[in-house]
Amino acid sequence: MLPHEIGSAIEQDVLDRFLRYVQIATTSDEKSPSIPSTPGQIDLLRLLATEARELGLEVRCEEARGFTLATLPARPGVAAEPFAVYAHVDTSPEQPGRGVRPVCHLDWDGSAIGFSDDPDLSLTPADSPELAALGGETIITASGGTLLGADDKAGVAEILAALAALRRFDSLPHGEIVACFTTDEEIGRGTEGLDLTLLPRYGYTIDGGAPGELEDECFDAWRIDLAVTGVGVHPGTAKGRLVHAGMILARLLAMLPEKESPEHTEAREGFFYLSESHGSVEHASASLIVRDFEAEANQQRIERVKELALDFESRFPGSRIEVNAREQYRNMHTILREHPQVVARADEAIRETGLDLLRHPIRGGTDGSLLTQLGHPTPNIFAGGMLAHSRKEWIAHRSLCQATETIIHLARRWT
């Protein structure tokens, strides 16, 4: 545990930073070709660069490539291998992210938390069991019309608050630490513009959920895009002529196994997930994501979709169904198990913070998944946000502090 003086300084600093960052609209946009995909992300990158310079850090803000680097030099006389910490500034496009109004529910009494912008919305331990142990704590939510943005502005705030404390308090040992703030993680582009030559070999994403989480395994991830072409004819004279692309697509999607969907799976079970679909008589399209911890299982899912496409083309003469599958990221465990010291140091730092270690695979992915594949082993450490991508998203003030403290202990573990 940290001395009282350091802990007190962290408490206010990380809260102020978090509340400031979530009010900047940074929703990413998969349909945008620009880097980053939305201008609000540049606004936050600039702010982070300014605040890092005020701390006396070495800063490199690459707006056109979508990242900001802030480097804390090693304390004089400290010998240590450098490491990086990563957080993404964008928020999910699944919920509105403009006009976020954070609300601090002080000394929460355990009752249902209401939302001023949506009286029908409420947050209780039934929605998120982790709340049950946080009576008397400060719980932070948005006002109900937007997500909060703790994914991953909590990580952003925690990293800068940790670097500020390391800079301020001479009693805290550390080597060189590179903070890397990325863009467009939520749409799978978080590492596209990064100059890997500027980064240490090892690092950690601060992008997980509950306090104590440490993750070195994630989904193997693919995306499947379907495009169906039909033949349009007046419905009054359609018999034997009409080939309805929208109906063909609907029937094909209905053939996917119901039990292999996110709402029916947990732990290490994989799934198909329909993320988007559009349909008319002559043209219909859909995008699926397929997820599993075993690459072979995902290949079987891809083959199943291709077989369905061929079957439906034969059932509906005149139709054409195109299937395009592309890899998004891989399970990072196969590489991270070859670098046990990286995970072990995070394990020790979390325990030193006073938390029970929670080890389980990520039912998702982070920038660390891609960085690991690119030769920079990068497991994931908790940031504390819960119910991500939801208007009920929340985080406890205590969790912000615990993640910040974990980064500080991690710095000592690398010396």
Image (tube, helix red, strand yellow):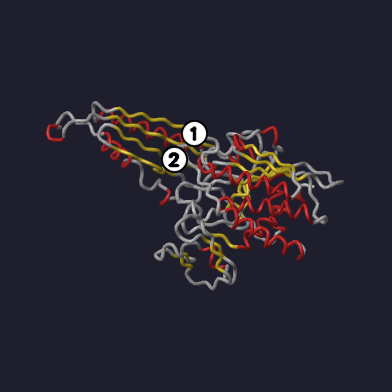
Q: Tell me the number on the disc at residue 411.
A: none
Q: Position of residue 324 (x, y in %)?
A: 41, 30
Question: Disc 1 marks which amino acid?
Answer: Pro
Answer with left or right where residue 403 lies relative to residue 312. Answer: right
Residue under pointer 2? 289
Which image quadrant is residue 283 in?
top left
Q: Position of residue 310 (x, y in %)?
A: 32, 29
Cα–Cα span, label 1 and label 2: 20 Å
Looking at the image, which residue is at 62% across and 35% down? 194
Looking at the image, which residue is at 73% across and 43% down? 71
Furthest toward the right, the residue is 77
Q: Quadrant of the N terminus?
A: bottom right
Q: How many marks?
A: 2
Q: Nearer the viewer, mark 1 or mark 2?
A: 1
Q: Position of residue 375 (x, y in %)?
A: 65, 34
Q: Secondary structure at mark 1?
A: loop
Question: Disc 2 marks which amino acid?
Answer: Ile
Q: Is residue 108 above or below residue 369?
A: below
Answer with left or right where residue 287 lies relative to residue 107. Answer: left
Considering depth in this image, is 382 or 62 the residue closer to the camera? 62
Give the class, few, some or many, for how many residues have Cα within 10 Å of label 1's Cα (few <14, many ≥20): few
Considering depth in this image, is 256 or 203 the residue closer to the camera? 203
Q: Position of residue 307 (x, y in %)?
A: 35, 31
Q: Are marks 1 and 2 in contact (CB under 8 Å)?
A: no
Residue under pointer 1? 33
For marks 1 and 2, the one nearer the N-term is 1
Which image quadrant is residue 320 in?
top left
Q: Secondary structure at mark 2?
A: strand
